[in-house]
Image: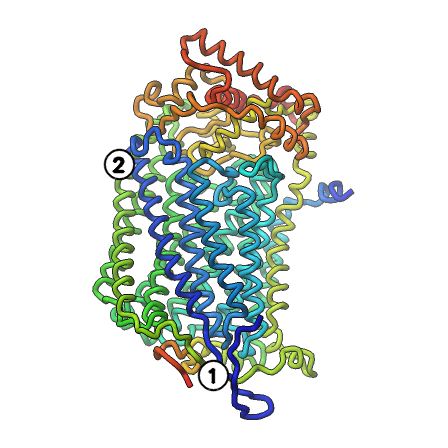
Amino acid sequence: MIKEALARIPLQHMSIVGLILFILLFAGAVLWVNRKGSDKVYKHLEEMPLDLDSDATARGGVNE
Amino acid sequence: MNNQQSSGANTGSQNQVESFQYDDDIVRKFTLATLTWGLVAMLAGLYIALQLAYFKLGQNLPWLSFGRIRPLHTNAAIFAFAGNAIFAGIYYSTQRLLRTRLWSDAVSRFHFWGWQTIIVSAALTLPFGITQGKEYAELEWPIDILIAVVWVAFGLNLLQTIRIRREKHIYVAIWFYIATFITVAVLHIVNSLAIPVTFFKSYEIYAGVTDALVQWWYGHNAVAFFLTTPFLGLMYYFIPKAVNRPVYSYRLSVIHFWTLVFIYIWAGPHHLLNTALPDWAQTVGMVFSVMLWIPSWGGMINGILTLRGAWDKLRTDPPTKFLVAATTFYGMATFEGPLLAIKSVSALAHYTDWIIAHVHAGALGWNGLLSFGMIYYLVPRLWKTKPLNVSWMNIHFWTATVGILIYTISMWAAGITQGLMWMGMDSAGKLLYPDFVQTVIRIVPLYWVRAFGGLLYLSGFVLMLVNVYQAIQTASADYTNEVTDRYPRFKALTEKLFSPGFTHERLEAMPMVLAGLALVGILIGTAVEIVPFVTANSYSESIYQGAKVKHYTPLEQAGRDIYVREGCYLCHSQMIRKLDFDVVRYGPESKMEESMWDHPFQWGSKRIGPDLAREGGKFPNLWHYRHMNNPRDLTAQSIMPSYPWLLSDKTDFEVLSKKISVLKTLGVPYSDDDVSNAVALAHAQAKIIVDDLKANGATMVDEDREIVALIAYLQLLGKQIEAPQKVGAR
């Protein structure tokens, strides 16, 4: 039953289906990252690796 | 299980500041393992590069033959060198980005020692021909199980560390790590499914075209999710750290992540263009490969532009130089990859050294240089050493860069030269270079050039080892004292998540949701590509109604296992593509039915020697006997190694019944009599071959010699379909 169903899927259209899915995902991601109020979040996030308070090792020792 | 050394001062009901220590000991362990295995991987690579230039190297030593050492090189480079580098970088950055110690010291150590055990097991089995015969997935089933266990331990440690974090937000590097864990787990488990015959031998559950698709779904995405996504995570952490600038665009990094994770998984079939794989799957692979340009270059540009305002670091800071050069190589390799995935380009490049150039631009340039930059950054911090020797780092940088360029340019030249020679036909449709060896000897000088490029790269790496060793000699006496940090306790996650006003911020801070979405992203492409092939055998049979596809006799199967053991697939394809110049050279295009009983498939990915799909009957038995003993006896300019041990070593007949029984379980249409009489059937067929060999002048040949089984297998190739193909049935 499952095999028969699979055999009837028009597989030649899969590239188009995938392309449409990708465009939707891409558009969704672009909208998502530009959502209202995201500036503050991303400002905080992009600074995370640079937060020296969290990288005591960089100064070779204890950070207290 | 929590290893936090928490003691804290209360600064308020919501922000209890805690002190805790980072586990840098585990990072040091993985760093040293990276350097150790990097040397092994590069030495093995140089060795096999020299073997192609000078075939006598390692001659007559089975465990040093090209077909056995090449998998050792690839496994060492991918899983030992790059793998340990990934773990070092992930464990270092994750702790700092999440402001917490790794979840469990015990699991971290299990992860480390388990991974090293896997690597040592690979090094002890591959040279002895213990292999499953699938590229980058050669390791036998007991090691596969260990890989799965250790990988799950790594994932558990990662996810649990995320759970106990003090920082609410999850930086994008961690997203890449999560995607790495999930996808590699899925890839490894699905691709490694096999039924054991003995402790050192198993058969994959997939066969033929299904096995090919699953293997390249795995192989391509091993590159994607073992050699790309974790390194992108490291790029997003270490470049900003090295240049002390935030990433150029965090928004772009988010788009980069989701598009990359979604697209990559679909692109596997580009390894099978123009083959017997159905056209729709090839087209999907090609289209999605071309689409990969978008996220790959988005990420590359994001990494490089992080240097805005700090370009002088390229001149003054060697670790930055390595990190940025690595990102540049990432851009070049990910431009070249989609280009090679276009069908017409693939027609020229596939099976040639152009692919080898592409792979090494990624491995040496992207993975290698990024690992070096990361280690140069980490060593003074992990061991509290004096600064490393800057001049030596600069020399390393230039020897590595020039070495990569020499390597890739020579292999581009070799690949395009040989590809064009294979394609060359005159106006009458005859091949311009009908003798395959003509196309080989033309590129042998380039193999020497390639080896020189590899030697340069290795020389720079040795300088790095000395530099790091000398630096560690200056390590502070208290370097093992764990680094203490302080950070406010993160309010209970569940309290945040289920409070009113659920917002996007929280979604991006939910690791399990992120992990779930990433899993869905990869499963969509997986389902589309893999599931239809579950039915492949049934519809392939319908194409040739009335035709019968022969399965292997016990002796042929024994010979096939020897073929797999010796890694013949690493130099010989068994896939005649739907291309005129392939058909004219080798015979009718390969049909998917012809390999439908092949556990595993042996289509191959490289032609250092000619395709063997229709080798059966081309030459008499004695030709194969003499050829395996010394190829130069029949083709004076051949660079193929000699296999004299096949004439003296004995085939294990006793295990044949068990092998046939397992294959029967997997769906190969053996009868019960075939299983119970496997040994007798094998002896009977061997006697026919031996009689023929003796009648034609061979001496000292017995039925139980491995050469006899191998000849039986080779003589069947291309003769699997018994009834003529029905015209117009396709």
Residue at the extreme bottom: B12
Q: Is residue B665 above or below residue B635?
A: below
Mark 2 / mark 1, whichever is N-terminal: 2
Residue B29 visible in image: yes
Q: Amino acid at mark 2?
A: Pro
Numbered circle sitting on residue B555: none
Q: Is residue A6 above or below residue B390?
A: above
Provide the chain ID for the residue under circle 2.
Answer: B
Residue at the extreme left: B391
What residue appears at the point 56 percent right and 88 percent down from the top-left corner? B15
Give the x, y percent position of residue B709. Answer: 51, 22
Quarter where residue B378 is shown:
bottom left
Please state which of residues A56 and B640 is positioned toward the viewer in this rendering.
A56
Q: Secondary structure at mark 2?
A: helix
What residue appears at the point 39 percent right and 18 percent down from the top-left corner? B626
Quarter where residue B719 is shown:
top right
Q: Which residue is mark 2?
A: B445
Give the x, y percent position of residue A6. Answer: 72, 44
Within-10-Å neighbours for mark 1: few <14, some 14–19, many 20+: many
Provide the chain ID for the residue under circle 1.
Answer: B
Q: Which residue is mark 1?
A: B486
Q: On the rendered structure, is B157 left or right of B60?
A: right
Please state which of residues B365 and B40 is positioned toward the viewer in this rendering.
B40
Q: CA distance from mark 2 to mark 1?
A: 60 Å
Residue at the extreme right: A1
Q: Secondary structure at mark 1?
A: strand
Please state which of residues B661 and B256 is positioned toward the viewer in this rendering.
B661
